[in-house]
Amino acid sequence: MIHFIRQLIRTGLKRKGVTLVVAYLVLLMASSLLIMMVEPADSALTRLDQALWWSVVTSTTVGYGDLYPVSTPGKIVAVFLPMFMGIGLGAAFITHVASALIERRDRKMHGEKKYDGSHHILIVGVTDETEHLIAEIQRDDTYLKLPLVVVADRDRHPFPDMEHVFFVKGRPDASATLTKAGIHSAGRIIIHTGNDEESLFALINALKLKNETCDITVRCLNSQSLDTFSSVPGNFQTIMQMTAEMMVQAMQDKVHLPLQVLLRNDARDEIYYVSVPQTGPVMTWWELHTRLKETYNFLTFAMQTSDSKVIINPDAAQAVTGGDGIWLMAQKRPLHIDWS
């Protein structure tokens, strides 16, 4: 019997405790039936319900004392079954549960677990600015509770204290790592590995693996790499910290001052992009600009036509129709614009 229980414990540890639960139930029934057989007729333990209750409270070491064996054979059954073996099975099960929880957390902290969610934001690469990037994403109410999956070749979770942030360990430019991070079901992808070559390979793999509706933003550090990124076929956008033109303007006209304030998000307003619905009215840029400013205090400054042409500071008479996109500055994401 002891050998049988030992085998059950070993098997149960391998099968996530299912066998331990079955073994415990079998032990309860066996001890209940045996105590009914060996106890005298006037003992309360000759009834199945009472015998089962006694087996439960004895094996869990509660021992209320309301029921107990009165015969020597009954006491022997109590010692070997509900007491000795029951306590052993219970300890083994508790140990298994604790070990499983610790192992699961450890795998999550070391990025070994596959991400099975969907519509998440996939952040490919970790730099000194990633924590600030995540904080800025979560400042937006739209993305506050949206899961973020960070891919990095690190030993442990780089941001263990940040909520809704999942970590996947591996090379950011490797297809296997991106697949493990759930790229097929991601809603958005941000690539900023801190190395243009690594970001380029990550971009190529991401374009092959992502779904059709997923948007990709890749960060380019060196202006000389822009031509290389631009030669990659596919739908994505490339951003840089500061171009040479912006640096010259910063020197001449100090345009970097408002830009720095805006990029640091110290100001009240932030930049958002909204699409004009297909059923929206045809209007001029100045009509739209004036209406959004007077009604919502939104400041429009650029648009994208339905054929993907970007126009900065459009002419007042520029037509705006359904399908066009508008860049504007607002204190919160403009979700409820009345286009009628």
Image: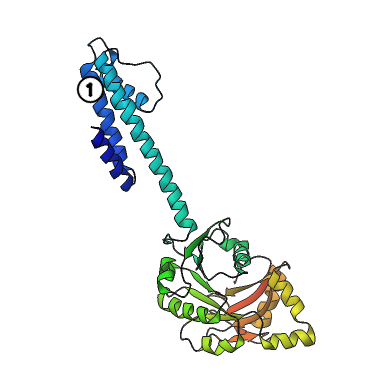
Residue plotted at (75% across, 84% down): 250
Q: Is residue 327 left or right of residue 165?
A: right
* Residue 14 appears in the figure: yes
Q: Which residue is mark 1?
A: 34
* Residue 49 appears in the figure: no
- Return the residue nearer the eye: 194 or 91: 91
Where is residue 269 shown, x and y percent of the image? 70, 69
Residue plotted at (72% across, 85% down): 247
**Could you say which quadrant of the image residue 57 lies in?**
top left
Q: Is residue 26 left or right of residue 299?
A: left
Residue extending farthest left: 37
Where is residue 45 shown, x and y percent of the image? 28, 17
Residue plotted at (43% across, 74% down): 174
Where is residue 189 shown, x and y percent of the image? 50, 72
Local crowd size for mark 1, using a 10 Å CA cut-off: few (<14), some (14–19), many (≥20): some
Q: Quadrant of the N terminus?
A: top left
Residue plotted at (37% across, 15% down): 66
Q: Is 234 placed above or below 36 here? A: below
Q: Is residue 119 left or right of residue 52?
A: right
Where is residue 259 shown, x and y percent of the image? 72, 77
